[in-house]
Image: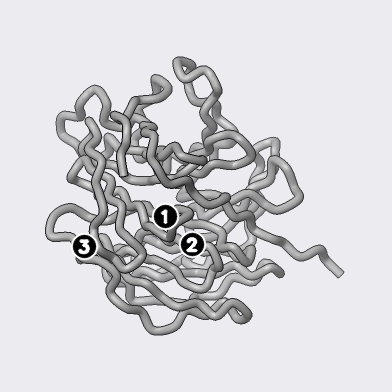
Amino acid sequence: MSAAEPAALWPDRLGLGEGIRAVEGRIVLVDILAGRLLTGPADRTAPLTQLARLAEPLGAVAPVHARPGHWIAAAGTGICLIAPDGSAEWTARPEEGAAHAMRMNDATADPHGRFWAYDAVEGAGSLYRVGHDGTVDRVLDGLTVPNGPAFTADGCAMYLADSAKGVIRRYPVDPDSGLPGAPETFARFDGGSPDGMAVDAEGGLWTAVWGTGTVHRLRPDGAPDRQIRLPATQPAGVCLDGDTLYVTSARHGLAEPGPLDGAVFSVRVDVPGLPTAAYRQESPA
């Protein structure tokens, strides 16, 4: 595979840029700790446009099927729906009042239309699944520092990173029940922490590796394929829009951030991505 040099887009420098997605011809992303849902204008020299701002951290969103401008979001201590006017309607707050302080982090919809989100609590993290009827179930717990998730094209396998341990695991997922099975280790990293992930049309897995300034592509069998180096220390989220890879980064936690820490980058790659899945919400009876 070959790739061009990464280019910084838009003038914004985000505190903790994550949850980047290609949705209906535009790029959307979040600045987690600021609670901001953003989109990138076609003019790459103009600032990011704010779609919504919550009063609590906003981990990631997915579009809601057949409801333009509506989003399902992992935010604060739970799950909410964000309307086109930016208002939020809470579906559930499963971690409200938990013994360990937490916040929702990354999230995504799978090809079957379910929404998956996890909380960031070292040693006590959980993965939640939102069903078509809006029911929120905890399907995994005891996670260290989870990141991802990402799904294969058929939705029958899920990748989930254990960032603190430098491991990405692959879980089989029952397409009917949406229950994950026993995981297998997919990849290990000796340095840095695997973070946001995306699957391409050949089944390759792209992952940002926090702390290393790199994004890696792994083959479907987990073998390393290539890496892209960025002029930012903390790449966090990735998505593919056609043959363009987009990468978010973070300034948060850096004592002396560089001029491109917190920027959003793009780079041309040889294998296109998969369409962004939407959350499919059942209509009330």
| 162 vs 229: above or below | below
Residue drawn at point x = 56 percent, y = 63 percent? 110
Q: Which mark is residue 105?
A: 1
Residue 202 drawn above or below residue 70: below
Estimate the spatial distance between the alpha carbons at disc 2 and disc 3, rounded to whole Å: 20 Å
Of the residues shown, which amino acid type is indicated by label 3? Gly
Q: Does the rendering let one see residue 10?
A: yes
Q: Are marks 2 and 3 in contact (CB under 8 Å)?
A: no
Where does residue 125 sit, x and y in percent of width and height? Answer: 36, 68
- Which residue is nearer to you in this view: 270 or 48? 270
Q: Which quadrant would residue 135 be assigned to in this image? A: bottom right
* Mark 2 burial class by Cα count in 10 Å: few <14, some 14-19, many 20+: many
Horizontal placement of 128 versus 184: left or right?
A: right
Q: Which residue is mark 3?
A: 166
Q: Tell me where residue 130 sits by quadrant.
A: bottom right
Q: Can residue 122 be seen by looking at this rendering? A: no
Looking at the figure, which quarter contains the C terminus? Answer: bottom right
Q: Is residue 208 left or right of residue 49?
A: left
Q: Amino acid at mark 2?
A: Ala
Rendered residue at 18%/45% (across/down): 212
What numbered label is drawn on residue 28?
A: none
Q: Are marks 1 and 2 in contact (CB under 8 Å)?
A: yes
Q: Secondary structure at mark 1?
A: strand
Distance between mark 1 and mark 2 Cα atoms: 7 Å
Q: Which residue is mark 2?
A: 117
Left or right: residue 202 versus residue 207 is right
